[in-house]
Image (cartoon, rainbow, N blue to C red):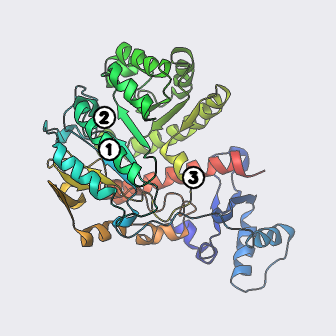
Amino acid sequence: MKKFMEFKALASKDIYPFPITSDLEKLGKWIVYLPLIRYATIVDKDVVVELQNAICGRPYGKTPIVEDILSHMEDEKKKIYYTSSDETGLLNMMILPNNKCNFHCSYCYSAYGRSGKEISYDKLSSAIDYFFDISRAANQRLTISVLGGGEPLLSWDLLKRALNHAFELGVKRKTKIPVSLVTNGSLIPENMLEYCKENDISVSVSFDILEDIQREQRGSYELVKDNINRISDYGLNVALNTVITNSNVDRMKEMILHMDNEMPLVKKVSFKSLISNSYFSDMQAREDYYRKFVDHFFEAKDLAQKKGIYLVCPYWNAVICLADRYCPGKFVVTAEGTISICHCVSSEKDLLYDKFIYGRISEGHVDIDREKLQAILAFNQNKFDSCQTCPCRWHCAGGCYTDNCTMSEIEKETYCVSMRYFLEKFLLKYVIQ
């Protein structure tokens, strides 16, 4: 990060210069990026020096490019999403109804915490009452996501009863409650499809697309693929969540083609990168994986666009937004009857459980540790000196809280390098004319 510190004065004005690394023809050139107005241009480094002289009030060469960049500082600013520092800003309720699953995915983040537990309806309905209480979050758009933990559809009857209760509260609030459901796709009863269609519930299926990869990492390829097509044929919009490992990181275009051929009605997919420390043998392996992920993602993105498929990934979701915090924080209801800040930590067996749990549910009551919650929500880009001069400051915004709690400093920096690499390729492809 030292190479960015020399232009700290520019960063203080939300001007972020950084060297190009992805395009051999442009090596030695720099990008000057103004994220708050979504402006970027390519310059020589001496232009960056003159730009900083101008910002600092020193004599500078008034070249057309320097003057043009300075003039853009007066452009209208894009909206920044500033996150709340207390529970009134928790607008997404994640329901993890159980800690049991019928799959054994090779990269599962929650497998260690499996206990077979399922939350009681009384506790779940109490959490729903608290979340939708008008005195907590009046006039706010509140949403529900159902996921795991485990496989949520193993608790379908419980979920349906709880969602009916939430929909009733939505009527009282005079608003429709958007609900999304994530499943491994193995358990898709007809009544579930009917219920999702009646209530406009969006469905995402965790599926690794290619037959050999699904069999290697998750299993049940034919069953899940057929169920995905059943969901689509029923008239529901279904999206895929696909984990990218070393086994498929260089096969992203193939995955898009396979989707188009085998699941033609599916028009959205998210490629998830791996973070887990246990997955990489050393730092070089981690670095190589990230770079491959970024390069192949943009190739697949072009193909997906031609096929009418909307392809995203965590990097993409970050660069298209401006925020002061990577994640606004969640109201995650666990099978243990507790409230976690993140769905990745939901079991008493999880190493970060005590650190992430800020609430406990009893029948008819939810107890929030507000001091602990505020401390968690205070985690953002301002926590790190390195973020202040980074071009990803308003996109990555300090990074995922969970990742920051589990990764070493060198592992974090490797991820930061990959985030800047993604931003660089994004700007060169979509922003710089």
Residue 405, placed above or below residue 55? above
Which quadrant holds residue 132?
Answer: bottom left
Q: Position of residue 31 (x, y in %)?
A: 69, 59
Query: In this view of the protein, which residue sits in the foreground, 129 or 22?
Result: 129
Circle 2 SS class: loop
Residue 305 is drawn in which quadrant? top right
- Where is residue 15? Give x, y as percent: 65, 69
**Gap in angstroms between the C-alphas marked 3 and 2:** 26 Å
Q: Residues within 10 Å of mark 1 (few under 14, many from 20)?
A: some
User: Residue 30 versus residue 431: which sits nearer the camera?
Assistant: 431
C-alpha distance separating marks 1 and 3: 22 Å
Residue under numbered circle 1: 276
**Residue labelled with disc 3:** 319
Choose top left, top right, bottom left or bottom right for residue 401. bottom left
Residue 332, percent from left and from top: 29, 51
Q: Is residue 215 left or right of residue 318?
A: left
Amino acid marked by disc 2: Tyr
**To which residue does mark 2 refer?**
107
Q: Earlier in the sequence, mark 1 or mark 3?
A: 1
